[in-house]
């Protein structure tokens, strides 16, 4: 029974998507069903995480009863279970935001089914123990995200969707090259079995490093790591707010998950070289992402570049490679997902009250003067992104910087420490423009609670408010998350536990 529990976070949203499609002619029923389905999936993922943490070993489900490595394995260890909880938590709030959104796209009959398939793809990619199965789930994720952006109310949605689709095709191409190289060299695609054969084969296999390079490139594209970031700002700016909040918070974490699997399971002996690459790219990402966010003209675009910088911090933690820094990277990943989803929802909330629905600074300047509650939430979110107490962002930054000191990584720590001030600059600048300055054109700008047609407009504030509350809770009471991250790191430090659970013996 416990092993079947692994399938629930995948099957619940997948089955829910099929039923939601049958309810397409009753939009209110479809929306309510989607929220119930995603909440049930989140509850199942919490149950899975609790079960795994208490059992002391990974749970494994062998599909069709075929033993590994011949069948497809689903594996829930602390890393995959924690990342699935993170994913489905944010997905629940995304649906909650969509329920209160005034976007036309949320009324389309395919919107909620696609949202559930997005959750299915991301969850499955993190729970699979087979690298080809990860590719399949990732493709489901890409197709769902592409269509959700293409049908956006934003007139640039189709263009952004094309960019994302074609760059994702490139990522798929690299992943298939990696899969082909690994299978040709080792005759298996089960990750536990691959780990054993790569360890036994040593560094002499000529296809090993090409496979590593292809996988690194794949996960860099998935996480929009510099220099493969160029698709992200357009994509996240044009996507519906409920969707962009998912894409910029949890979808990019698939790459982070991949980097952790590469360095702690698949390529343990080659991990020092991989981590050195991630460290350099992480530092560059922190600098480039921060400077780009300062120079941009759109709140959503600013937050998209911010994701590039924040993922850079996570890569630095993985790059340092100590148990303490890996723990910090995991904590940072979870907290960033909560913060970024909240901030993008707040940006969408403000944009929905503009005369022209846009998050461009020229449009939303002064729009927050009549929205003090949103201003307070945005200010707290800004503090969290910048790593200022009493928010969870402070816990992330403090843990990461402490791990750098512990690892004696002083030069890289100096780089990310100094450049982290960029976050405070661009978030406070955005806060000032939206809540302090006068609206452009004042009354003629059309800002307020009425659209030009006179109908009430504006998205609901409930979802970002709940996330900001979680930001404060995880900042004031961080012990459960820290303890879970430490337990996860301990498991990652002993890949034999994962391998034995999957292969037996």
Image (cartoon, helix red, strand yellow):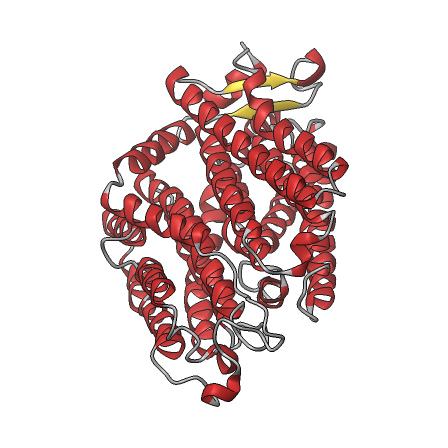
The part of the image, by quadrant, that contains residue 322 is: top left
Q: Position of residue 42 (x, y in %)?
A: 50, 33
Identity of the residue drawn at 75% across and 39% down: 21
Q: Between residues 61 and 317, which one lies in front from this camera angle?
A: 61
Identity of the residue drawn at 45% across and 61% down: 346
Identity of the residue drawn at 76% across and 36% down: 22
Q: Position of residue 233 (x, y in %)?
A: 57, 67
Residue that extends furthest to the front in the rendered view of this protein: 454
Identity of the residue drawn at 72% across and 32% down: 19
Specify whether 92 is left or right of 206. left
Q: Between residues 462 and 340, which one lies in front from this camera angle?
A: 462
Q: Between residues 421 and 355, which one lies in front from this camera angle?
A: 355
- Label tally: 0
The part of the image, by quadrant, that contains residue 35 is: top right
Q: Position of residue 355 (x, y in %)?
A: 56, 77
Q: Is residue 314 above or below residue 303?
A: above
Q: Between residues 455 and 245, which one lies in front from this camera angle?
A: 455
Q: Position of residue 197 (x, y in %)?
A: 60, 26
Q: Is residue 495 visible?
A: no
Q: Is residue 269 above or below residue 100?
A: above
Q: Is residue 243 above or below residue 306?
A: above
Quarter holding the N terminus is top right
Specify whether 256 is left or right of 401. right
Q: Is residue 278 visible?
A: yes
């Amino acid at each position: 029974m416990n092993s079947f529990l692994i399938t629930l976070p995948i099957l619940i949203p997948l089955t829910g998507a099929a039923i939601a499609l049958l309810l397409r002619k009753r939009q209110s029923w479809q929306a309510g069903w989607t929220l119930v389905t995603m909440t049930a999936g989140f509850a199942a993922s919490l149950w899975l995480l609790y079960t795994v943490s208490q059992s002391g070993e990974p749970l494994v489900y062998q599909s069709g009863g075929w033993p590994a490595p011949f069948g497809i394995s689903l594996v829930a260890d602390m890393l995959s279970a924690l990342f699935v909880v993170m994913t489905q938590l944010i997905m629940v709030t995304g649906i909650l935001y969509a329920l209160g959104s005034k976007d036309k796209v949320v009324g389309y009959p395919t919107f909620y089914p696609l949202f559930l398939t997005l959750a299915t793809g991301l969850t499955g990619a993190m729970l699979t123990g087979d690298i080809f199965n990860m590719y399949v789930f990732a493709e489901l994720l890409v197709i769902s995200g592409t269509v959700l952006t293409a049908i956006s109310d934003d007139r640039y949605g189709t263009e952004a969707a094309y960019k994302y689709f074609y760059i994702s095709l490139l990522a798929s191409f690299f992943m298939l090259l990696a899969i082909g190289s690994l299978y040709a060299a080792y005759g298996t695609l089960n990750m536990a079995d691959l780990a054993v054969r790569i360890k036994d084969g040593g560094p002499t296999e000529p296809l090993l490093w090409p496979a590593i390079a292809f996988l690194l490139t794949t996960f860099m594209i998935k996480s929009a790591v510099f220099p493969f970031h160029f698709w992200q700002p357009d994509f996240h700016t044009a996507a519906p707010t409920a969707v962009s909040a998912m894409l910029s918070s949890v979808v990019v974490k698939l790459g982070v998950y991949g980097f952790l699997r590469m360095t702690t399971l698949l390529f343990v002996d080659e991990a020092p070289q991989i981590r050195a690459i991630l460290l350099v790219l992480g530092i560059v990402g922190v600098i480039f992402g921060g400077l780009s966010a300062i120079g941009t003209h759109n709140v959503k675009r600013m937050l998209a570049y911010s994701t590039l910088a924040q993922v850079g911090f996570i890569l630095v933690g993985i790059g340092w490679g100590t148990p303490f820094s890996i723990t910090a990277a995991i904590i940072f990943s979870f907290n960033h997902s909560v913060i970024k989803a909240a901030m993008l929802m707040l940006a969408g909330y403000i944009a929905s009250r503009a005369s022209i629905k846009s998050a461009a600074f020229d449009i939303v300047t002064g729009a927050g003067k009549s929205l003090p509650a949103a201003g307070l939430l945005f200010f707290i979110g800004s503090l969290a992104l910048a790593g200022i107490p009493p928010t969870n962002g402070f816990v992330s930054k403090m843990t990461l910087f402490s791990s750098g000191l512990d690892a004696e990584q002083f030069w890289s720590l100096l780089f990310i420490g100094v450049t982290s001030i960029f976050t405070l600059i661009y978030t406070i600048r955005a806060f000032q423009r939206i809540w302090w300055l006068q609206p452009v054109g004042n009354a003629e700008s059309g800002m307020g609670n009425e659209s030009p047609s006179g109908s009430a407009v504006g998205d609901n504030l409930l979802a970002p408010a709940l996330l900001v509350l979680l930001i404060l809770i995880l900042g004031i009471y961080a012990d459960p998350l820290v303890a879970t991250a430490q337990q996860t790191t301990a498991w990652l430090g002993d890949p034999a536990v994962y391998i034995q659970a999957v292969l037996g013996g």
